[in-house]
Image: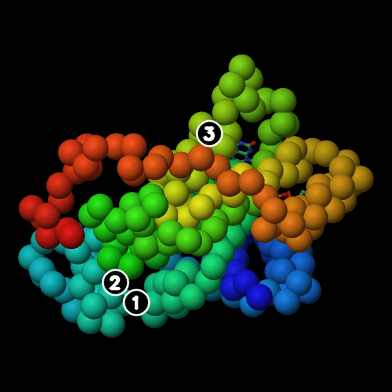
Amino acid sequence: MAKIHVVHAHPEPRSFCTAMAHEARRVLESRGDDVSFSDLYALDFDPVVRASEFAERANSDYLVYALEQRHALERNTLAPEVRREVDALLASDTLMLVFPLYWFSVPALIKGWIDRCFLSGALYGGKRIYGRGGMAGKRAVIGVTLGGREHMFGPQAIHGELAGGMLRHLLQGTLGYVGYQVVEPFFAWHIPYCSDTQRADTLTRWRDFVDRLDEQPGMPMPRLEQYDDVFLPRRDHIGFK
Ligand code: FAD
């Protein structure tokens, strides 16, 4: 039995994207997996990083967000909504994000969830990145709905590469960075404009993808052993280890 944390953000609860998130939960639970599910709109999750989220500051004079995250983690004073997500992330073997593509990127709610919950000290820190990251040994996968058609994305296509290009910040710079083995993403193309039959086919393809999650290939990530330690930044001067 796998433990999977599903995180979803869409402003319309009857959206296709939300249907994908709920279908994923249903398929995973029917396999016997233990699923935790965070619908960030339903939770009214605050995506904005701010000083006031720290009840007790390490340095009340000047905010270094990552250091205050570490301090709050150590003192057990994280904001409850962040604590809940961090606990779910640490307890799960797999993280699944389900969201619509907004402006070549993630919706602000997903971005803010990452900023607040991918906690320095717990998920990464100093030289604990990629294969040494806090989430090494776990898997991450994204299911994304788009307006664009499949042929609009690719090395020679108008918008360029999707997984290796516009979503690299998420797949490598975030999920891979903290150590996850990142699964090749699932894309639901052209969703608002395609026919009902095509949407039904996409949902069938998604259910099958989720059901075979363990068999999905991973994406290549930088291997630390290929880079001399000298190229890794020294951060101990501002308190990182
Ligand atoms: P919806 O509009 O919710 O659903 C489409 C249709 O599916 C509806 O008719 C709905 O009734 C139906 N449906 C719902 N549930 C089901 C079900 N279970 N089975 C079958 N049908 C169902 N797109 C890009 O390609 N690139 C971008 O950079 C981009 N940027 C964007 C930026 C913003 C701010 C916004 C708002 C949109 C952007 N888009 C972009 C488009 C966006 O990604 C798509 O509109 C979105 O992903 C479509 O998914 P949805 O769930 O919102 O579809």
Q: Name the image quarter holding the C terminus.
A: bottom left
Tell me the quarter of the picture where residue 12 sits: bottom right
> Can you tell which mark lies on residue 79?
1
Q: Position of residue 206 (x, y in %)?
A: 76, 53
Q: Which residue is the site of mark 2?
A: 53
* Mark 3 neighbour class, 10 Å CA radius: few under 14, some 14 to 19, many 20 or more: some
Q: Which of marks 2 and 3 is nearer the N terminus?
A: 2
Above-or-below relation of 126 to 102: below
Q: Type of residue at label 1?
A: Ala
138 is higher (above) or lower (below) than 147: below
Instruction: Describe residue 149's horizontal placement relative to residue 112 as left or right.
Output: right
Q: Which of marks 2 and 1 is nearer the N terminus?
A: 2
Residue 20's tag is none
Q: Can residue 55 be seen in this view?
A: no
Identity of the residue drawn at 73% across and 39% down: 189
Name of the residue lying farthest toward the right: 197
Q: Name the residue under label 3.
A: 164
Q: Let me know if residue 129 appears in the view.
A: yes
Single out the residue that lies furthest toward the top: 156
Type of the residue with mark 3: Gly
Q: Are marks 2 and 3 in contact (CB under 8 Å)?
A: no
Judging from the image, what secondary structure is the residue with disc 1 in? loop
Where does the image place residue 199, in percent across and percent down from the top left? 84, 47
Q: What residue type is labelled 2?
A: Glu
> Which residue is at 53% across, 34% downward?
164
Q: How far apart are marks 2 and 1 (CA)?
A: 6 Å
Q: Earlier in the sequence, mark 1 or mark 3?
A: 1
Q: Residue 202's x, y, as percent?
A: 81, 47
Name the one closer to the observer, 42 or 68. Answer: 68
Q: Decide which of 86, 9 is in the foreground and name it.
A: 86
Q: How far apart are marks 1 and 3 (CA)?
A: 34 Å
Contact (CB < 8 A) between labels 1 and 3? no
